[in-house]
Every structure is written in C-alpha cells, then in structure tokens.
C-alpha cells in the first residue's frame, strides 16, 4: 500500500477481501474542481497512542506562520510557512514557549493540567492559548503571547477550558469551558459549571478581565423541561448549569453571536455577544439509520458492509465552524460522538453481545439511556453521526448531513483498513463504536466558493466538500496520509485543522497520535491542461480560465511559465483584451487612457517587469474606465503600507476591498515583480 493514498483517483482500486458497499459513491457524482496534495510536514518526534501531542493549530496571517500546541511537551511552537522545497518535508519550529513555566511565574500555586487550544488575533500579531488546571475543579488560564513568543498577559477563565477563539472583529476572546465531573457523580463530588468565558481585548492585551457566561437561567424546572422536550440530553435530576458541557465555540461573521457545541448533550447553545447571555440551547435530534442514505457498518465482523439498521445516531458534534450565505448564518458540525466516562460506575454505555440483545452476535456500543433524559423509550441509540452536518443557525435545524459518505468512501479506498482505530491497524475495529469518528471541521473560501474540511480521527485523513450552497453540497476529495504498514506511522489521528486563506490556499492539519503536522496544498483537479508546467501549480484553475478565455496566452504551446515576471507591455495587452478591443494596440490604448504609471524616465518601458503596485494601479484604472465603482469601506491596513506609493495606494486598497488583488501574510509587497501566475489570478477574479 502506498505511503500517501489520496483523493478520488483511488476509487479505481480493485476491492480486496470481502467488501460490500451499497450504494457506491462514484466519481461522476462528486465535485471535480480541487484536490488536496501534501506540500510540507513537521514531525515533533513525540508520539502518543492516547493523543494529546500536536493537537490544535492556528494560522497567523500577520507573519504567514502556524502556531501549534503540544500537550505532551507543554509547548506552544511557531513554524514559518515561508519554506523552500528543500526543507518542506522537514519543517522546524522558529521557537518554542513553555506555557506551564510562564504561568508559574505569575501564579506559583497553579498546577498545570493541559494545553488545550490556541488562536490568533485577526487584527494584531498576537496569539492566545488555553490551559487547564490539574485539579478538575479549578479555573484555567488564557495566556496571551506576541507572535514572537513574548508573554503579554495571563487571565483566569472558566473550569476546564477546551477551546479558545477570537471573534472575527478581534474585540473579544472566548473559551468553551467543559466543567466535566471527572471524579464521577455522587454525594460530595464536585460537578463544575459548564461556562463560556468572554475576555474583552478591544483596548489592550494586558490587564484583562473575564466574564463567565453560565447556563443557570435554564435551571428552572420549566426551562429544563423545555430542553428535555427538545431532546437535549441531561443526566436525570441534574441542573443544566452543571450538566451542559461546552466543547467548542465559534463566532458569527458579524461578531454578534457565539455558537457553542455541547457535545455530550447533543446540543448547540447560542450566545448573544451584545448582552453576554446564553439565549438558547437546542438539541440536534437523532440520525435515523433506518433511512436510505444513512447506511452504516455496525458489525465488527471483519468486513465492510454498509446497511440500514434500526438504531439512532446521537450527533454529538465536537469541532464546529460557521459561515454565512446571503446574510444567513450556518453552523457546520463534525459529528464525533462522546461518552461521559467519568468515575467507575456512571459511564452511560453498554455493550451488546449474544447474552444480551443480539445483532448477529456482534459487540456494539450503545448509549445506556436509563440515567438520562432526552431520549425516547423503545429506541436504541449509538454514539456519533459518522458524518458532518450543516445547521441553520436561526432555527437550529439540520439542513444537510453527509449521511453514509464517510464510511462508503473509506470502504472503497481502504478495504483492508476500513474502520480501523488510530493506535492499531485492525480491520473493522471501530464499526461497533463510532466508525471513522469525524473530529474537527474548518471552513475556507476559495474564490467565490466555500469548502468544508473534516478530519477523521480513527482511520485518518481529510474529507473536502463544497458547501457554497447548503442545499447542494458536493463531495470534492479525500486524502489519507497515514502509513498502514505499521500501527502508528505517517500521519495518524487528525485532531485540529486550520485553513490558510491566501493566494495559495492551504490546509494545516495537526495529528495528535503521530505528533505530526501536515501542510496540504489545495490544487485544481481534472482540468484538461495543455501547459506542462502548471499541473501542480496552485493557480492552475486561474491560469486555465484566463487562457481558455483568450485573455492571456502561454509563452508557447506547452509552456505557461507561471513563475516568471509579467511585463508592462503584457499588462497593457491583457487589459486591452479585457476591454474587448480587438483592433487597437494595447500600449497605445493604455497610454491614451492614462491607465499605467510612467517609467522613471517618462518612458513606457514595455519590456520591463511590472511591479505589484504598478499592476494594481493599471487594473484599478481599467475597472474605473469600465464603469466599476468602489465604495469607501473599512479595510485592513497592510503591514508595509508605508512602502506604497501615493499614486497607487488608493488603487491597492480599492482592489483589496473587493478581493480582486490581495497581499500575502498581511503584506502587499508593492515593489516585488508580479509573476504571470499572479496576473492570471487577478484577471480570473475580474472575469468572475
């Protein structure tokens, strides 16, 4: 088996062993636009079969780097994404910060329990990490660092912070604090409040205070009854304020609302950030595996056989994300499933075997509903949805679910390793439990399209879907970079994902068992390319589009030369073609309409390389000439704003405001030469 098995090209694999998949997902039924391809890797050198190594990562656009946490080593590490081909597969940290030691300097009595999450400010070169206390009843800390790893401040947050994030406007930081009863239930045993901490950072990253949002308003008998009626899972006789366990938090694009996954409760909470109040908690319902499209392999019988079963899946999302379509907010959920395995007597699961309710004599893990409210009598429930879903953030109704896709696809691609676990290669090992176990989901925008990326914790790999239209979701690609020749080799157990929204879009994936982080390029696929030098180029889509439109040609029949410089004459020519002029000289037309800045000696200098700011100036003037209008909008200032010439600054920010031409890593690099590929990207956006 190849070390790196990727994408739907593997659907041509012949089946081996006893593999029965019905119905089959064919390549014709799926989107064909992009594929995931390995571009770089970091290996921490620390493996752990129980996870917790390179768990969570975040992208920092301010310095084009990724920041990751390693729970085993207690380190925050920064790794630059400005790597070369020579060192791409052997990335090294620029620095590491021992977070436990930093906190100890501020609070000598704090006992480190775990490093759980990290996030980056959208406005400044600042990162924040969430740290749990060793005592499960004690508050944790949020640790603020500069992008260079210098300590800014630490601030106490709720109990057991599990996820941390910035609001899109950068004004607040939020943490989802689980408050799990890790010593079980019983008289005198503490079950901490589940909370969401809100830290105001609008004025400063020092001298911070925290507000902990609780769910105590739902403790009233009538409110609790409403939750149960809505199928929110609650332990019998327990108050919602202690039994609701926030797992993950995301914020709407307008920064007005936070959405919180309550994994063990199979619910999502909504928080109004203008009042800092939890305004609703909604159950997600249950997945009916009797229905067509919801087939699953529930039997650990050493074969991949998907079929309908009389069971109901509890979605129980772990990672969630959010996006907006036409002003409407949606939540995207990775439906992992999770049991409350605290203490020795209160684990709400039971195993079926031939001595109990038999399903072909197979061991299956069901939810023991006896001690919990929110279920219907006479039904059998299993953990997780083995899928990802899209939820209407207003109604909290599921508008899309991927059904049985994940098991169908992995069964076809990896028949020998179907539903294996993440610390041992065993066929069918997870079928009776939670299947592939989707762990995290991130959303990213490429051009005008929106994509979801979902990590599968057990068998491994990343699923990619086009979710631009929530009513017409399309599978795009699946890549698995695990090496199945050994139990823990290659990239094992994706835990945290981060999307890089750049001119070269990428996906960063942290693997908690193998201790590796992989950088995936997101490349165009299945395009009839005539140029031999763009097949693996990140701008293949755009290059193909503009050449097929007749706006920009290759340097010859087989070569496009994407990384060579674009000239001033070529700029005038393509803008002339965009204007629809077929009988005029491009240079003369550009001069006549004052589209381009003159050379330093007042000559046109047609064969001279054009700089990025000169190109922006020309494109802006062409668009204005064509009738395009640019409203005055709030823009994100480039770090190298001082380098922009006075003549070109307005044009550069106008193009930025409409996403036509943007910088990289928050710099515009105005004096760098523009490449032919970069020109193709800008032109393709104009053609949209």
Image: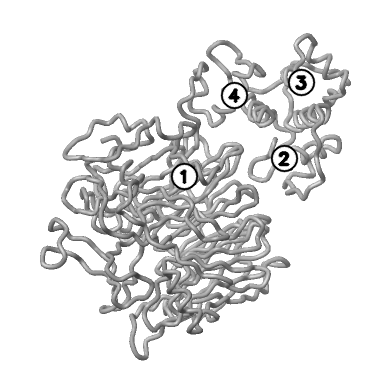
Which residue occupies 59% across, 55% down? 329
Tell me which label, 1 or 3, sits earlier in the chain: 1
Q: Nearer the viewer, mark 4 or mark 1?
A: 4
Name the element at disc 4: helix
Which residue shows up at 54% across the image and 32% down it?
538
Pick out the residue farthest to the bottom: 188
- In percent of width and height, residue 173 lies at 61, 65
Q: Residues within 10 Å of mark 4 (few under 14, many from 20)?
A: many
Q: Which mark is residue 658?
A: 2
Give the image location of residue 237, x and y in percent. 39, 84
- Tag 4–tag 1 contact (CB < 8 Å): no
Q: Which mark identifies residue 91?
A: 1
Using the rendered image of the protein, determine whether residue 125 is visible from the camera's viewpoint: no
Q: Which residue is mark 3?
A: 579
User: Marks 2/4: CA distance?
Assistant: 20 Å
Q: Find the distance from the CA under tag 2 to the CA under tag 1.
A: 34 Å
- Of helix, strand and loop, which one carries label 3? loop
Q: Residue at x 39, y 60 (%)?
A: 315
Mark 3 and mark 2 lie on one chain; the one further toward the N terminus is 3
Q: Earlier in the sequence, mark 4 or mark 1?
A: 1
**Which quadrant is the C terminus positioned in?**
top right
Mark earlier in primary sequence (4, 3): 4
Q: Is residue 371 left or right of residue 501?
A: left
- Residue bearing the label numbered 4: 545
């Amino acid at each position: 088996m190849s070390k790196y098995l990727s994408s739907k090209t593997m659907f041509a694999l012949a089946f081996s062993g006893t593999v029965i998949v019905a119905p089959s997902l064919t390549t014709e039924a799926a989107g064909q636009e992009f594929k995931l391809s390995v571009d770089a890797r970091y290996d921490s050198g620390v493996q752990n079969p129980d996870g917790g190594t390179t768990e969570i990562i975040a992208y920092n656009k301010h310095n084009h780097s990724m920041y990751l946490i390693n729970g085993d080593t207690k380190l925050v590490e920064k790794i630059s994404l400005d790597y070369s081909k020579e060192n791409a597969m052997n990335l090294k940290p620029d620095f590491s910060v021992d977070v436990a030691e930093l906190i100890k300097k501020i609070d000598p009595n704090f006992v480190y329990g775990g490093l759980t999450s990290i996030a980056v400010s959208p406005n400044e070169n600042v990162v924040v990490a969430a740290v749990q206390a060793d005592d499960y009843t004690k508050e944790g800390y949020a640790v603020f660092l500069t992008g260079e790893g210098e300590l800014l401040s630490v601030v106490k947050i709720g109990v057991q912070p599990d996820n941390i994030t910035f609001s899109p406007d950068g004004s607040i930081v939020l943490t989802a604090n689980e408050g799990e009863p890790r010593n079980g239930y019983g008289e005198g045993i503490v079950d901490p409040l589940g909370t969401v901490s809100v830290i105001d950072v609008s004025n400063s990253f020092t001298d911070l205070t925290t507000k902990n949002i609780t769910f105590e308003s739902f403790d009233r008998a009538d409110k609790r009854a409403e939750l149960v009626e809505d199928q929110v899972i609650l332990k019998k006789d327990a108050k919602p304020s202690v039994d609701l366990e926030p797992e993950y938090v995301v914020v709407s694009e307008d920064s007005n609302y936070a959405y919180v996954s309550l994994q063990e409760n199979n619910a999502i909470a909504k928080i109004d950030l203008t009042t800092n109040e939890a305004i609703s908690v909604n159950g997600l319902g249950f997945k009916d595996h009797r229905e067509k499209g919801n087939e699953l392999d529930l039997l650990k019988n050493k074969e991949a056989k998907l079929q309908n079963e009389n069971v109901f899946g509890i979605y129980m999302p772990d990672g969630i994300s959010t996006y907006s379509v036409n002003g409407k907010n949606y939540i995207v959920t990775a439906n992992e499933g999770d049991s409350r395995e605290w203490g020795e007597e209160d684990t709400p699961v039971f195993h079926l075997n031939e001595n109990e309710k038999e399903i072909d004599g197979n061991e299956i893990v069901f939810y023991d509903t006896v001690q919990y409210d929110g279920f219907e009598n006479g039904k059998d429930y299993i953990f997780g949805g083995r899928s990802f879903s899209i939820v209407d953030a207003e109604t909290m109704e599921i508008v899309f679910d991927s059904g049985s896709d994940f098991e169908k696809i992995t069964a076809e691609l990896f028949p020998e390793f179907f539903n294996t676990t993440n610390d041992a290669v065993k066929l069918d090992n997870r079928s009776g439990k939670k299947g592939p176990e989707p762990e995290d989901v991130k959303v990213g925008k490429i051009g005008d399209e929106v994509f979801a990326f979902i990590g599968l914790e057990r068998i491994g790999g990343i699923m990619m879907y086009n979710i631009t239209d929530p009513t017409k979701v399309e599978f795009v690609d699946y890549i698995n970079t695990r090496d199945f020749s050994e139990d823990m080799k290659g990239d094992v157990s994706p835990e945290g994902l981060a999307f890089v929204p750049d001119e070269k879009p990428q996906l960063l994936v942290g693997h908690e068992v193998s201790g590796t982080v992989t950088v995936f390029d997101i490349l165009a696929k299945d395009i009839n390319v005539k140029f031999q030098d763009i097949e693996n180029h990140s701008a293949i889509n755009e290059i193909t589009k503009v050449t097929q439109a007749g706006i920009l040609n290759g340097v010859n029949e087989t070569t496009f030369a994407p990384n060579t410089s674009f000239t001033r004459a070529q700029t005038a020519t393509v803008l002339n073609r965009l204007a629809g002029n077929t009988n005029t000289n491009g240079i003369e037309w550009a001069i006549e309409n004052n589209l381009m800045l003159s050379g330093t000696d007042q000559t046109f200098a047609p064969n001279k390389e054009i700089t990025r700011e000169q190109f922006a100036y020309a494109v802006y003037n062409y668009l204005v000439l064509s009738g395009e209008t640019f409203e005055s909008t709030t823009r994100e200032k480039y770090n190298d704003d001082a380098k922009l010439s006075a003549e070109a600054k307005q044009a550069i920010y106008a193009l930025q405001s409409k996403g036509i031409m943007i910088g990289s890593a928050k710099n515009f690099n105005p004096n760098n030469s523009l490449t032919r590929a970069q020109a193709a990207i800008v032109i393709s956006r104009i053609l949209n």
